[in-house]
Image (cartoon, rainbow, N blue to C red):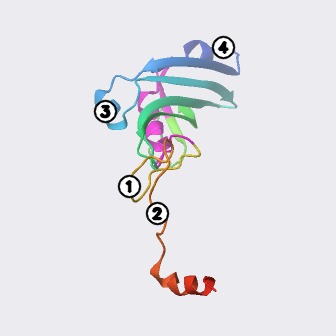
Amino acid sequence: MLIRLNKFLSSDALSFRFNERFAIDDEDFLSKTHLDKDIDFSGEVFKVEDSVLLTGTIRYTFADVCSRCLAEFDNTVETSFEASIVSRLDEDEETDEIQLIVTDGCVELDEIIKQMIYLSMPMKSLCKKDCKGICPTCGVNLNFEECECENNLTDPRFNKLKDLLKD
């Protein structure tokens, strides 16, 4: 994705908003992430004193598997980031901020968007907040049907306590 900043940088405007829907062409990236190729990206570019800053929000959908019930579902994630737009990278200066280079009045965002997607993907996902999961004994999905297993899974160290309750 390419953002053209020529007019904005030469104007007196202090901010520039954009909202784009674009497709990622990297088949290897799409297969590794199970990502839907269409991604929504919105953001704003600001002039702050002698620097230019970008704030962006990425919204994407990918095929995921629920960590509790193992059902497949489409997971939608939204993540935000900030970056400074510079004319060249200063090799001597170490910084933790994201820096994007302006080339011919344009900023290329493909690589930073891919990195932000990798960083924002959840390690564990749930198909819904109140997912009941699967029965550890019979494997039934408890979201759709009741389990008929006996719930006598207890720690044998507590058997003596059961004897106290019999009286």
C-alpha gap between disc 2 and disc 1: 10 Å
**Which portion, as a residue range, is magenta?**
100-128
Q: Which residue is mark 4?
A: 11
Q: Position of residue 149 (x, y in %)?
A: 44, 59
C-alpha gap between disc 4 and disc 3: 41 Å
Quadrant containing the C terminus in the rendered view: bottom right
Q: Position of residue 162 (x, y in %)?
A: 56, 82
Q: Amino acid at mark 1?
A: Cys
SS category of the residue bearing label 3: helix
Figure disc tally: 4
C-alpha gap between disc 3 and disc 2: 42 Å
Quadrant containing the N terminus in the rendered view: top left
SS category of the residue bearing label 4: loop
Which disc is residue 138 wearing? 1
Q: Which residue is mark 3?
A: 31
Q: Of the residues tagged 3 and 2, which is closer to the observer?
A: 2
Is residue 105 in view from this perspective? no
The residue lying toward the viewer, choosing from 165 and 98, is: 165
Q: Quadrant of residue 50?
A: top right
Q: Which residue is mark 2?
A: 150
